[in-house]
Image (spheres, rainbow, N blue to C red):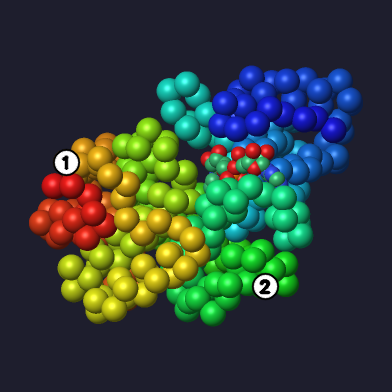
Amino acid sequence: MFEMGEGEDAKTLSTVETLSRELAQWGLLRGDLVLALGGGVVGDTAGFAAAVYYRGVDVVQVPTTLLAMVDSAIGGKTGVNLPEGKNLVGAFHQPRGVFVNPTVLATLPDREYRCGLGEIAKYALMGDDFASAHVDALVRRDPAVLAEVIARCVEIKARVVAADELELTGVRAVLNYGHTLAHALETASGHGLMHGEAVAIGLVFAAQLAAVLERVPPDVAARTETLVQSLGLPTYAPPGLRADDLVTIMQRDKKSGGGLTFVLDGPSGIERVDDPDPDAVRKALAAIRVEA
Ligand SMILES: NC(=O)c1ccc[n+]([C@@H]2O[C@H](COP(=O)([O-])OP(=O)(O)OC[C@H]3O[C@@H](n4cnc5c(N)ncnc54)[C@H](O)[C@@H]3O)[C@@H](O)[C@H]2O)c1
Ligand SMILES: [Zn+2]
């Protein structure tokens, strides 16, 4: 057993080195495996150590946060942070298996749990909404309902990843639904908003933008807002954020390549949309109460 520190600050090359040295001292063999038990921080760090130790030993992911169960443990992305930025060093390393037991979620702090619900809302809004009918059970952390809902999310993520495992064709970009604005909100709020909360607001924004662009009927925005709100997540931006600042941050987003790129719903489903009408973007930002 190797216990790592907690939080983003522990997701470092230095932790990978310490863990790798432990593996060497234990005499880990090529046929052995690393079992990553914890949230996304543990999964990413241990997964990356497994990806590089002996140029790759097997890893099994045992996620213990809701976010890790539906998102970070699935898809094979592993990695650590540098002082210069998050997730800058990493590798694709698919786990041998992922084992999820929703009963461990009973002890997860409330805010962490709700952040996982933000990602679940994302999957539900990407296809046939399987979450709205189970809102109360989800908020109660009902293990039977969680098992079903988590499995649906895993299926969706696994299907998308299988079609674009190494993020080469752009198919995987649909997993960033709600995330363009979310990343900007996290940055602009000085990380006062947690990732899942920012995703929740980002989903409402994406639906508003799709409605303003007449890609979807207006009731899609209302339905998105209802789902997000009923899961106990925020539906509009916190006060003090300005549209200009958010747009500037979104243009800097490493995945945007300089323009403004969103992932939006539309007649042919969720897809990447480059450089939409700037006035529409402003209108959608105003709809989530961002100051002009
Ligand atoms: N690899 C990917 O594809 C991918 C995708 C999304 C996010 N991520 C990464 O995941 C990380 C975030 O993961 P996270 O949200 O799971 O956060 P986390 O791993 O930091 O866990 C959150 C907190 O919950 C605690 N915890 C974990 N399980 C618990 C339990 N069952 N009961 C009580 N407390 C528990 C942890 O100790 C920690 O304090 C970020 O570093 C992010 O970059 C990776
Ligand atoms: Zn996310």
Q: Which mark is residue 145?
A: 2
- The quadrant in which residue 4 appears is top right
Q: Secondary structure at mark 1?
A: helix
Residue type, mark 2 in image: Val
Task: Specify whether tag 1 is near ligand 2 (CB below 8 Å).
Answer: no
Position of 129 compared to 27: left or right?
A: left
Around disc 1, counting alpha carbons within 10 Å, would you say few (fewer than 14), some (14 to 19), or many (20 or more)?
few
Q: Quadrant of ligand 1?
A: top right
Of the residues under marks 1 and 2, which one precedes in the sequence? 2
- Image quadrant holding the N terminus, namely top right
- Disc 1 and disc 2: Cα gap in Å? 41 Å
Q: Nearer the viewer, residue 253 or 158?
A: 253
Q: Nearer the viewer, residue 205 or 167?
A: 205
Question: Eyeballing the image, is 74 above or below 80?
Answer: below
Q: Nearer the viewer, residue 258 or 222?
A: 222
Around disc 2, counting alpha carbons within 10 Å, would you say few (fewer than 14), some (14 to 19), or many (20 or more)?
some
Q: Secondary structure at mark 2?
A: helix
- The quadrant in which residue 229 appears is bottom left
List x then y, in percent, for residue 83.
Answer: 47, 21
What residue is at 44 percent from the left and 70 percent from the top? 227
- The quadrant in which residue 29 appears is top right
List x then y, in percent, for residue 28.
Answer: 86, 31
Toward the right, the furthest residue is: 27
Residue beneath disc 1 = 244
Position of 134 compared to 104: left or right?
A: left
Query: From this viewpoint, is residue 272 visible?
Result: no
List x then y, in percent, for residue 33.
Answer: 81, 41
What residue is at 70 percent from the left and 55 percent from the top? 105
What residue is at 30 percent from the left and 61 percent from the top? 206
Residue type, mark 1 in image: Asp
Question: Eyeballing the image, is 256 above or below 18?
Answer: below
What residue is at 71 percent from the left and 43 percent from the top? 38
